[in-house]
Image: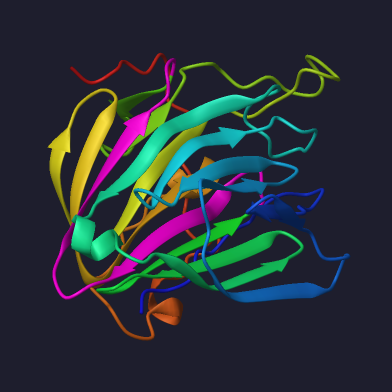
Amino acid sequence: MAAPAQAKTSVTGGDFAVTVNGTTYNPAQGKDLKLSNVAPSGRVAVRGIHVGFDIDVATLGVYDYTLTGAPDPQRMVTSPTVIFASKVPTLTPAQLAGATIESLEVKDDSAVIIFQTALGKYKIQAKDGAQGGIFQMETEFAGPVEFTHTLAPGIFYFQNAFTGKINFGNGIDAVTAAQSASGYHQMLLGKDSPQVATKTLQTATVTKWIVQPGGRLGGVLGEDAIELSAGATNCTSQCQAQNRIQGSLPVPPDPQNPTPLP
């Protein structure tokens, strides 16, 4: 299994609530809730203080991944902003057949959902944070799975002039609290975070990846997205220690006037 998503999350903390079949699960602070062997219908709604998204059981895709802009020193937007229109695995009808929630765990700012289908498993881990390594998807099928990431309107991929790496954002400069006590925010910066995965397409708004069994495709926001790291290894087992950065690497300045890729 790939490493869990690591996150600096937020200063103010998070609180996830997950709605399945019309029932919302939101345990008390410090408590956890576990749900198992549920046949979901429609969409599973994941809502937090800083992050929200839906999971469509018909595709096991994630839709409308949103930053809320809730007050926090690490926030990168000041109002609800959809970052990804969708993050969708390409699965066959046989791979999707009989999808059930094998397990759901919700505790404070953390949610882990594992779907079981006729041919494998699909895992989503999320943190309710303003930035950091706060999202990833893993598949456990016999072969590789293609993922397609589609950015929302107003968000674009660009090459960071300071690092040479591909980031995404909206190009809006940061605003300090001294400049605006209520409208402060950091620059919106993110990157796809693959492990044991190969990029097959890159445009201004879409990336496609082939993820091997045991690999994952995550998302990193904020300072972690521009650290001068070497990137993830090809580890597929007990990878957590080897791939944890936790702010120990130098962080370059915010990019200036980023230009969308062609």
Asked if residue 242 shows in the view, the reply is yes
Report the number of numbered marks: 0
Residue 130: percent from the left, percent from the top? 66, 43
The answer to which quarter of the image holds residue 206 is top left
Asked if residue 16 shows in the view, the reply is no
- For the residue pair 250 and 115, the one nearer the viewer reads as 115
Question: In the figure, is residue 77 to the left or right of 83?
Answer: right
Where the C terminus falls, by quadrant? top left
What residue is shown at x 63% (from left), y 29% (from top)? 186
Q: Is residue 72 above or below residue 125?
A: above
Question: In the figure, is residue 109 to the left or right of 95?
Answer: right
Residue 23: percent from the left, percent from the top? 73, 55
Question: In the figure, is residue 24 to the left or right of 226?
Answer: right
Question: In the figure, is residue 90 to the left or right of 77?
Answer: left
- For the residue pair 24 and 223, the one nearer the viewer reads as 24
The answer to which quarter of the image holds residue 79 is top right
Residue 209: percent from the left, percent from the top? 20, 49
What residue is shown at x 46% (from left), y 38% (from top)? 63
The answer to which quarter of the image holds residue 18 is bottom right
Query: Which residue range is magenta in the image?
Result: 128-154
Residue 123: percent from the left, percent from the top? 43, 66
Q: Is residue 179 above or below residue 254?
A: above
* Residue 226 part of the magenta-drawn span: no
Q: Is residue 259 above or below residue 168?
A: above
Where the N terminus falls, by quadrant? bottom left
What residue is shown at x 68% (from left), y 32% (from top)? 68
Q: How is the image coloured?
A: rainbow
